[in-house]
């Protein structure tokens, strides 16, 4: 299942509705860890691999990782193969892939990142936060074709 949203409250609500104790969550675009901390506080037994490229994230996420033994923070660009490989070495599969790359309008990078990471980790559930994707979905008309693959 793939959930697409833009509103941060809806994104978090969707995440909390599908997450369970024992899940492995790969969070791409964790920024300073606001959503990460909410997950860690709500679930006792989740494992989170959080990745972000922003300089603002480093100190806050490293501090959060020191507080929670079930959090691993990777500072790096999710578009780079070595960052994907580093995360994959920590967990070869995840229950939830959460992609929040700034929530910006243009979905092309989000599509590419989602495809590569989901092909690698084979998540049960995926969440994508991006305004462009929400606008696309809201304006699309679905034909009678079955899009499942």
Image (cartoon, grey):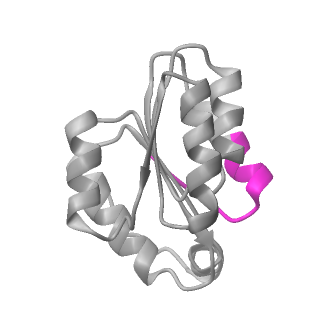
Q: Is residue 139 in view?
A: yes
| Picture quadrant where residue 24 is located | top left
Q: Is residue 92 in view?
A: no
Quarter of the picture holding the C terminus = bottom left
User: Exactly how many numbered labels are in the figure?
Assistant: 0
Image location (x, y in percent) of residue 84: 26, 56
Q: Does the magenta stretch include residue 4?
A: yes
Q: Does the magenta stretch include residue 139?
A: no
Q: Residue at x 37, y 64 (%)?
A: 78
Relative to 144, residue 21 above or below: above
Image location (x, y in percent) of residue 133: 56, 75
Front position in the image: 27 or 76: 76
Q: Which residue is drawn at 72% across and 41% down?
A: 13
Relative to 15, residue 86 above or below: below
Q: Which residue is drawn at 34% across and 35% down?
A: 94
Q: Which residue is drawn at 23% across and 43% down?
A: 88
| Picture quadrant where residue 82 is located | bottom left
| Picture quadrant where residue 130 is located | bottom right
Front position in the image: 97 or 65: 65
Image location (x, y in percent) of residue 86: 25, 48
Which residues, given as a range, are shown in magenta? Answer: 1-13
12 relative position to 149: left or right: right
Front position in the image: 63 or 19: 63
52 relative position to 84: left or right: right
């Amino acid at each position: 299942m793939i959930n697409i949203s833009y509103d941060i409250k809806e994104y978090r609500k969707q995440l909390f509705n599908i997450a369970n104790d024992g899940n492995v969550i790969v969070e791409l675009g964790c920024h300073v860890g606001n959503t990460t901390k909410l997950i860690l506080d709500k679930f006792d037994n989740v494992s989170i691999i959080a990745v972000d490229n922003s300089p603002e994230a480093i100190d806050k996420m490293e501090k959060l990782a020191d507080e929670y033994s079930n959090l691993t923070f990777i500072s790096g660009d999710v578009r780079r193969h070595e960052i994907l490989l580093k995360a994959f070495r920590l967990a070869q599969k995840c229950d939830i892939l959460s992609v929040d790359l700034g929530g910006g309008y243009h979905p092309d990078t989000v599509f590419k990142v989602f495809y590569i990471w989901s092909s690698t980790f084979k998540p049960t559930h995926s969440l994508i936060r991006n305004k462009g994707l929400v606008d696309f979905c809201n304006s699309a008309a679905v034909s009678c074709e079955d899009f499942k693959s």
